Image (spheres, coloured by chain):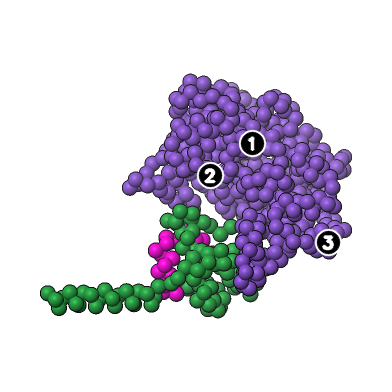
């Protein structure tokens, strides 16, 4: 019995550490909005996209979905790979804060106007 | 030899017939006669020198180089040069949302008692969501936002000011850089001004009623950058007209509104009056626009140009055709929900009800003298039938009326069972239906905002609302053909009663008499010919 308890404890601690390693901090959402828009402004000026407006609105996903996207750093669906690859971890946590706080299931879902 | 003379005559007549039949076709192949039709030539003359120029470079004006922290500061900067613009604009329907020229106690207009059958009412502008299209700064109605109509760059002003002020209050270097960049974007937008473009007008008129293409059918975002197939006048690969090319302006009053009063009262060309208050089809194309002898010229006194030259609308984007508010309020798993149709448009929303979208809409046709009669929230209705919230004014015997195309939006909306009036629910905000899904509360608050009674007893009634169609003029190859109207069954004008139309209408006695004449004439010719042949034969013999 003791053995099992020890195993469960070790497993819980391991999962917590691994989770913490992949977790993403929520930065400054106002800065996040600014940076998110700047990504597409630059991408539009470079000619890759037709519009400077971000293609994915914060309310396009739930908060859990945004957390999955940013934890895994899977930004393929956003396009503009050059601009996204140049963003620092701080920039990403700021964008995450903006998208997460205005997700479809948040108290204030938003579209980019 | 006896038949040589008649045979020669027959051959000669045959040759002449062939020549008469085929000569125009040969010439037509060389030159399209409609290309030199008077209407087209006149229109080309009227528009060929459309090179606009201005005398001011707004990037050089000191008044526009300052730091702006509010919209009102931008208005003040504009008015520092354009000193009379405020006084002019504040008198217009675009600012007041009240119909000019009507008795003041009637209060007809968006900001008054008028209503429709899609988003129903602004509740005398108490419904803030409607103010997104009022040309002020955000939902404020104090200062004019000149850039709604004159700005070339798109910017979310409320957010830009709010974010800039936030970053200005932060001490880190990154925030200061962001504040400076936002101010630079604001200044750039303030300095990028000019005459209104299709995008400026379209920012409201393409999205009226709560979304792209909801209202009109002939006005949606596809007209921001249309091609000639969508609109021969606005097509960027053709004439590339902006809206203000036809919607002429005097003292900030934009011509062309087709409601209580006609959009224009006289049908005249620019040669007669080049400062006409509204440029119409006839202003450039004349009243006999087709080539000489073309039957279509005989139609222009009774059929509006739009009826033939706008065969369908909503040819690129769908438009909303019906809106049933009585279906609103349903929930799934205890929560409001929404569903989409084949166009990707919401066809059901718990907050709005059941809606139907469609593309390539064939218009419905009515006699129309340019005015539309509308009901307000104060007018009594008969809920036993379909209530016309708005309807075209005119008739076949009215010399000012012509057959005109319309989109009809069909609705089901709330009415007061005791007072027999249409009701105006408050939709947005904490008390609005979109938040509460509570009709009693939304109707009470909405009627209270209007200062009108609500008995507390309501039901839903079927309604119609008309939109005259005058945009999305198609190329001539796709215009409505004669047979589409002059058809015995299912013609476009099948519902337009009260007058005789060849091809559509039938008077059996007249038809029988016609056939008697045709057959009688034929018999006469044959008998006469036979008589001549046999008589000649006897003489020769």
State which mark lies toward you, 3 or 1. 3
> Going by the image, does B42 lie left or right of B398?
right
Question: Residue sitting at 43 percent across and 72 percent down?
Answer: A24
Q: Which chain is green?
A: A
> Going by the image, does A19 lie left or right of B185?
left
Residue B368 shows in this picture: no
Q: Is residue A65 magenta?
A: yes
The span shown in magenta is A55-74
Question: Residue sitting at 62 percent across and 44 percent down?
Answer: B131
How far apart are the two marked residues, 2 and 1, measured between alpha carbons? 20 Å
Dividing the picture into quadrants, the one containing residue A32 is: bottom right
According to the picture, the residue beneath numbered tag 1 turns out to be B110
- Residue toward you, B473 or A45: A45
How far apart are the two marked residues, 3 and 1, measured between alpha carbons? 38 Å
**Are discs 2 and 3 both within one chain?**
yes
Quadrant of image for the C terminus of chain B? top right
Precedes in sequence: disc 3 or disc 1: 3
Give the numbered dot on residue B320: 2
How far apart are the two marked residues, 2 and 3, measured between alpha carbons? 46 Å
Question: Residue sitting at 49 percent across and 59 percent down?
Answer: A102
Give the numbered dot on residue B62: 3
Residue B263 shows in this picture: yes
**Are discs 3 and 1 both within one chain?**
yes
> Going by the image, does B133 lie left or right of B444?
right
């Amino acid at each position: 019995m003791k053995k099992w308890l020890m195993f469960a404890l070790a497993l819980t601690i391991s999962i917590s550490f691994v989770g913490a390693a992949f977790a993403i901090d929520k930065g400054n959402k106002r800065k996040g909005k600014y940076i998110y828009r700047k990504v597409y402004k630059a991408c539009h000026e470079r000619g890759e996209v037709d519009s400077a407006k971000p293609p994915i609105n914060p309310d396009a996903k739930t908060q859990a979905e945004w957390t999955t996207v940013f934890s895994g750093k899977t930004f393929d669906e956003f396009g503009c790979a050059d601009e996204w690859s140049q963003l620092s971890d701080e920039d990403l946590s700021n964008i995450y804060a903006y998208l997460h706080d205005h997700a479809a299931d948040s108290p204030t879902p938003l579209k980019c106007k | 030899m006896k038949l040589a003379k008649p045979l020669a005559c027959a051959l000669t007549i045959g040759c002449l017939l062939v020549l008469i039949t085929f000569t125009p076709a040969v010439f037509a192949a060389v030159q399209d006669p409609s290309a030199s039709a008077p209407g087209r030539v006149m229109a080309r003359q009227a528009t060929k020198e459309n090179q606009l120029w201005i005398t001011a470079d707004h990037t050089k004006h000191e008044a526009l180089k300052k730091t702006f922290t509010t919209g009102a500061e931008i208005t003040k900067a504009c008015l520092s040069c354009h000193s009379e613009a405020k006084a002019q604009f504040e008198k217009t329907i675009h600012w007041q949302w009240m119909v000019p020229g009507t008795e003041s106690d009637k209060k007809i207009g968006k900001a008054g008692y008028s209503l429709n059958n899609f988003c129903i009412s602004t509740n005398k502008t108490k419904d803030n969501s409607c103010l997104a299209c009022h040309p002020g700064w955000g939902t404020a109605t104090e200062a004019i936002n000149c850039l709604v109509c004159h700005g070339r760059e798109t910017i979310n002003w409320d957010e830009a000011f709010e974010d800039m002020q936030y970053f200005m209050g932060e001490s880190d270097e990154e925030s200061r850089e962001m504040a400076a960049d936002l101010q630079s974007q604001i200044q750039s937008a303030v300095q990028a001004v000019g005459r209104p473009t299709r995008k400026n007008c379209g920012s409201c008129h393409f999205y009226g009623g709560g979304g792209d293409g909801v209202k009109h059918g002939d006005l949606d975002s596809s007209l921001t950058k249309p091609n000639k197939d969508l609109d021969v006048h606005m097509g960027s690969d053709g004439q590339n007209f902006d809206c203000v090319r036809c919607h002429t302006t005097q003292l900030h009053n934009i011509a062309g509104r087709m409601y209580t009063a006609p959009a224009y009262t006289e049908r005249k060309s620019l040669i007669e009056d080049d400062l006409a208050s509204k440029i119409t089809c006839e202003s450039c194309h004349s009243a006999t626009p087709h080539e000489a002898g073309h039957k279509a010229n005989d139609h222009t006194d009774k059929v509006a140009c739009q009826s033939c030259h706008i065969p369908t609308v909503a040819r690129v984007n769908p438009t909303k055709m019906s809106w049933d508010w009585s279906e609103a309020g349903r929930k799934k798993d205890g929560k409001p929900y929404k569903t989409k149709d084949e166009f990707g448009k919401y066809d059901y929303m718990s907050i709005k009800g059941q809606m139907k979208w469609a593309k390539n809409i064939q218009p419905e046709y009515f006699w129309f003298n340019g005015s539309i009669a509308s009901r307000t929230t104060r007018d009594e209705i008969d809920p036993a039938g379909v209530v016309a919230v708005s309807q075209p004014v005119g008739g076949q015997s009215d010399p000012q009326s012509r057959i005109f195309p319309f989109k009809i939006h069909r609705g089901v909306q709330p009415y007061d069972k005791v007072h027999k009036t249409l009701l105006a629910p408050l939709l947005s905000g904490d008390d609005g239906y979109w938040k509460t899904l509570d009709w009693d509360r939304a109707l009470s608050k909405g009627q209270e905002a209007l200062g009108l009674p609500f008995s507390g007893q309501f039901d839903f009634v079927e309604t119609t609302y008309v939109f005259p169609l005058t945009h999305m003029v198609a190329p001539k190859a796709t215009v409505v053909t004669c047979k589409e109207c002059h058809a015995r069954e299912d013609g476009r004008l099948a519902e337009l009663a009260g007058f005789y139309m060849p091809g559509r209408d039938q008077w059996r006695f007249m038809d029988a008499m016609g056939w008697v004449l045709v057959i009688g004439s034929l018999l006469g010719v044959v008998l006469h010919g036979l008589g001549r042949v046999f008589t000649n034969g006897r003489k020769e013999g």
